[in-house]
Amino acid sequence: MKWQPVCDLQFKLAEGPFWDDVDQALYWVDIAGFRALRLHQGHVRHWQFNEPVSAFIPTVRGDALVTLASGVYRLDLDSPADHPGFSRLCVADPTSGNRANEARCDRYGRLWLGTMQNNLDAEGGDLPLERRSGGIYRVDADARVTPLLDGQGIVNTLLWTEDDRALLSADSLDGVIYRYPVRADGALGERAVWAPQHERGVPDGSAMDAQGYVWNARWGGQCLIRFAPDGTVDRIVDVPVSHPTSCVFGGPERTTLFVTSARPATDALDLDGCVISVETGIEGLTSHRFSG
């Protein structure tokens, strides 16, 4: 595989890639740099905030959602980089000292949001994790929030099985990906380990292909692991970054895999902190806009 950076920028903690089929644009964030970014027709735009931003997802209205530490906001994409125009949609997690981490919309356009203890200071520097105070929340189009789980460490990966009967979600503190049954009323049932710990890094964000296989970025593992629908390892895909953080399928045929990464303070590889891409020849599932 021939990996290429999508632009010449590098980030401390690039995360949350989203591919928009409508505009053929790639969205992502630099959580520790407090920036939301968009690549469209070869041009990168960014919006600067004063707190961590973990996800950047367009909406059916034509604006976008950004998940900040203080809540979920609507962002005016026509607003300037240094003075973004945004308004609060909701506060999904009311726990003091928490921040948003993983976020993704299901096929109905509802936002699912995973949170964690805030581990970043006012300058984006690292703070120690001291508690498992995170949760998973669902935000409907009308901004109604439904708490689904609590007591989580670091929520990463939010994917649904083809029949929508189960949620796949990792807790990176546990090093595993769990499977949660989705009950008829939308609540989550008792979890079971879907993919156990693996020597090649810790599970971070994921993408699903059209065959139902999960491509999971492995923090510290310098690879992605492609898991079969039953959670067994199908293949290991080496990447030229030490800390891949998440991935998404995109491009005109949705066969290009985009991978975000972090740049460690020491012993960084040349492409660490870049957003990289490769042509896979495998079609991925579409990313869904927020329906509100």
Image: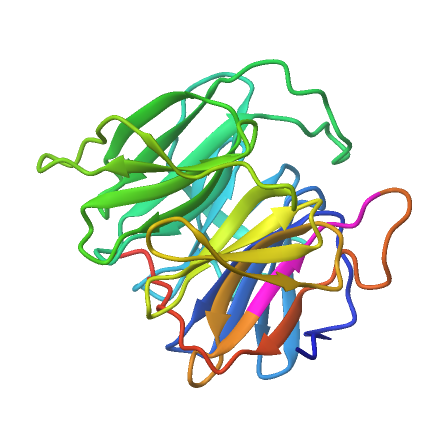
Q: Which residues are magenta?
A: 258-264
Left or right of 25 on screen, residue 151: left
Left or right of 62 on screen, residue 48: right
- Counting from the top left corner in percent of width and height, residue 63 is at 41, 61
- Counting from the top left corner in percent of width and height, residue 187 is at 19, 31
- Counting from the top left corner in percent of width and height, residue 19 is at 46, 68
- In this view of the protein, which residue sits in the foreground, 287 or 142? 287
Residue 55 visible in the current orientation = no
Q: Residue at x 28, y 35 (%)?
A: 180
Residue 206 visible in the current orientation = yes
Note whether 140 is above or below 121 in the view shown.
below
Left or right of 206 on screen, residue 224: right
For residue 183, what is the image quadrant? top left
Note whether 4 is above or below 195 in the view shown.
below
Q: How many numbered dots are placed on residues in this image?
A: 0
Q: Residue at x 71, y 49 (%)?
A: 243
Q: Residue at x 70, y 79 (%)?
A: 2
- In this view of the protein, which residue sits in the foreground, 248 or 292? 248
- Counting from the top left corner in percent of width and height, residue 244 is at 66, 53
- In this view of the protein, which residue sits in the foreground, 159 or 178? 178
